[in-house]
């Protein structure tokens, strides 16, 4: 099954939890601040070469965010997460524009945050975040020209077209794996 977003294809294959994705370890690498965190408490619900779906609790205790579901679109440079309150109410989608580094020897995937973020609220109001950090990271050499262009292009794709339709497609993927 293929879903189309403007200039973006999402390919869904059958369940292939094996190979590099078996006993997978996930990391989140941020450039600002410079940190790499093992996501040891994330529960991998599904993993194949194209899509990873996880559930998680906030890394640090927060009043506003309790849990979430993340959709890693491995070939698209997107990590789309649904954030929920401590009461289980849906708060918003939070999309990180990312690079993925797959280490087959370590059987790990590291998500490198390219700093640009897109938040989509339940009423489909869109907020683009951290473009100032993206600019600063480019000026200081933390990211190269290709990463800057990728971040801007993916951000543009996420906020273009019919936002509701685009994010409903992300939900269809999540629903395939989470009941």
Image (cartoon, helix red, strand yellow):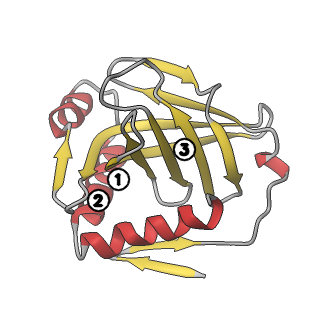
| Neighbours of disc 2 within 10 Å: few (<14), some (14-19), many (20+) | few
Mark 3–mark 2 CB contact (< 8 Å) = no
- In the image, taking residue 156 as reference, residue 18 lies left or right, namely right
- In the image, taking residue 126 as reference, residue 178 lies left or right, namely right
Label 3 sits on a secondary structure element that is: strand
Q: Which residue sits at x=20%, y=36%?
A: 130
- Residue beneath label 3, please? 100
- Residue beneath label 1, please? 150
Q: Is residue 154 above or below residue 40?
A: below
Q: Which residue sits at x=54%, y=67%?
A: 173
* Earlier residue among tags 3 and 2: 3
Q: Is residue 126 above or below residue 168?
A: above
Mark 1–mark 3 CB contact (< 8 Å) = no
Q: In which quadrant is the C terminus drawn? A: bottom right
* Farthest front residue in view: 87
Q: Position of residue 96 (x, y in %)?
A: 37, 45
Label 1 sits on a secondary structure element that is: helix
- In the image, taking residue 61 as reference, residue 138 lies left or right, namely left
* Earlier residue among tags 1 and 3: 3
| Neighbours of disc 3 within 10 Å: few (<14), some (14-19), many (20+) | many
- Residue beneath label 2, please? 153
Q: Which mark, residue 119?
A: none
Q: Is residue 58 above or below residue 87?
A: above
Q: Position of residue 12 (x, y in %)?
A: 62, 72
Marks 1 and 3: which is nearer the front?
A: 3
Label 2 sits on a secondary structure element that is: helix
Q: Position of residue 26 (x, y in %)?
A: 63, 34
Q: Position of residue 112 (x, y in %)?
A: 47, 36
How far is mark 2 from mark 1, CA to CA?
5 Å
Asked where in the image residue 170 lies, by quadrant, the reply is bottom left
Q: 113 or 120, which is in the foreground?
A: 120
Q: Which residue sits at x=61%, y=82%?
A: 1
């Amino acid at each position: 099954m293929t879903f189309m977003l403007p200039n973006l294809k999402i390919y869904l294959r059958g369940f292939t939890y094996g190979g590099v994705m078996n006993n997978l370890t996930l990391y989140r690498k941020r450039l600002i601040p410079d940190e790499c965190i093992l996501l040891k408490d994330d529960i991998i619900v599904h993993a194949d070469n194209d899509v990873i779906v996880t559930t998680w609790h906030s890394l640090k205790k927060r009043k506003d965010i309790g849990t979430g579901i993340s959709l890693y679109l491995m070939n698209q440079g997107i990590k789309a997460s649904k954030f929920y309150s401590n009461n289980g109410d849906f708060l918003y989608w939070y999309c990180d524009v990312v690079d993925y580094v797959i280490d087959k020897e370590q059987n790990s995937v590291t998500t490198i945050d390219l700093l640009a973020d897109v938040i989509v609220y339940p009423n489909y109001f869109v907020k683009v975040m951290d473009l100032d950090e993206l600019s600063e990271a480019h000026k200081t050499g933390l990211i190269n020209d290709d990463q800057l262009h990728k971040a801007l292009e993916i951000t543009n794709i996420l906020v273009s077209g019919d936002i509701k339709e685009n994010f409903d497609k992300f939900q269809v993927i999540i629903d395939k794996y989470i009941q």
